[in-house]
Image (cartoon, helix red, strand yellow):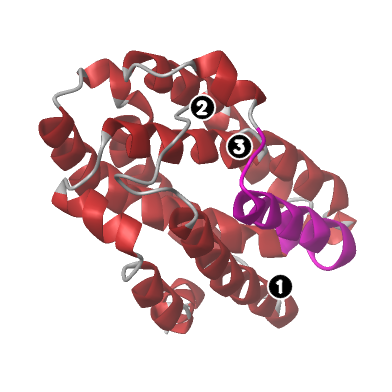
Amino acid sequence: MNFYEQLVQATENERQALHTVPQLISAMRGEISVETYIAYLTQAYHHVKHTIRFLMAMGLRVPEEKKWLHNVIAEYIDEEKGHEEWILNDIEAAGGDKEAARHSIPHLETQVLVAYNYDYLNRHNPVGFLGMVFMLESTSIQLATQGANTIQLALGLPASAFTYLQSHGTLDISHMEFFRKLVNQVDDTVDQAAIIEVARNTFHLFANVLRSIPMEGEVHHAA
């Protein structure tokens, strides 16, 4: 069993738990309001805007003997540039106020997800951030390939309100193949344990982010 397969196996419980979140179940069924969709995008914006910063922090902290990761990090940075602006444009296309979303205060659950990754990068093992990458890309593939089409049909919104999700359907499938090859090059057992630890924890924390999103009838102030 290669390391990627070990990572998939080690995170099975956390991935299954994520799929039990009511907000995710409702979204995948198309049982969602425009306000809830905008609320989801707003929280996505608040963690996605840190992706480049996470990657830069990782590159700064990897030790000299692991500097081969710099090329990988640079490629990820290139791919991730501007994604937070795609989200804000989707909010506007869905009828929301993108500037209100930009300047809104993230939910505590979103702040904890972001803070956990900064803390792990700074105080523990920067290579562990690849666990967050695994969580985001494996999750967004499902949301993009099934959820985006279902939500769009249910809400009757234009395709321009789904550029972030739809793009990740295509991007992250190729990204996952790239990621699989990458993590299989990580042969340090300490790094492998860090990747698994971060993946497990970020699946749990992202599930909390989804749980924090108001469902239909609970949204009082849409972004």
Mark 2 or 1: in front is 2
Q: Is residue 148 magenta?
A: no
Report x, y in % for residue 152.
18, 31
Report x, y in % for residue 80.
55, 32
Q: From the viewer's perspective, tell me whether residue 87 is left or right of residue 120.
A: left
User: Reading the chain from its start, which is encountered first: label 2 or label 1?
Assistant: 2
Q: From the viewer's perspective, tell me whether residue 172 is left or right of residue 99.
A: left
Q: CA distance from mark 2 to mark 3?
A: 11 Å
Is the C-beta separation of discs 3 and 1 under 8 Å?
no
Figure quadrant of residue 101: top right
Tell me what residue is drawn at x 31 percent, y 63 percent: 22
Give the secondary structure at mark 2: helix
Q: Amino acid at mark 2?
A: His
Q: Is residue 177 visible?
A: no
Disc number placed over residue 46 in the picture, else none: 3
Residue at image mark 2? 83
Please state the extent of the stretch shown in magenta in the rendering: 105-127
Give the secondary structure at mark 3: helix
Q: CA distance from mark 2 to mark 1?
A: 28 Å
Q: Label 1 neighbourhood size at 10 Å, few (<14), some (14-19), many (20+)?
A: some
Observer-nearest of 160 and 121: 160
Tell me what residue is drawn at x 22 percent, y 20 percent: 159
Above or below for 60 versus 127:
above
Report x, y in % for residue 114.
69, 50
Disc number placed over residue 191 in the picture, else none: 1
Q: Amino acid at mark 3?
A: His
Above or below for 34 versus 150:
above
The quadrant in which the N terminus is found is bottom left
User: Reading the chain from its start, which is encountered first: label 2 or label 3?
Assistant: 3
Tell me what residue is drawn at x 63 percent, y 70 percent: 195
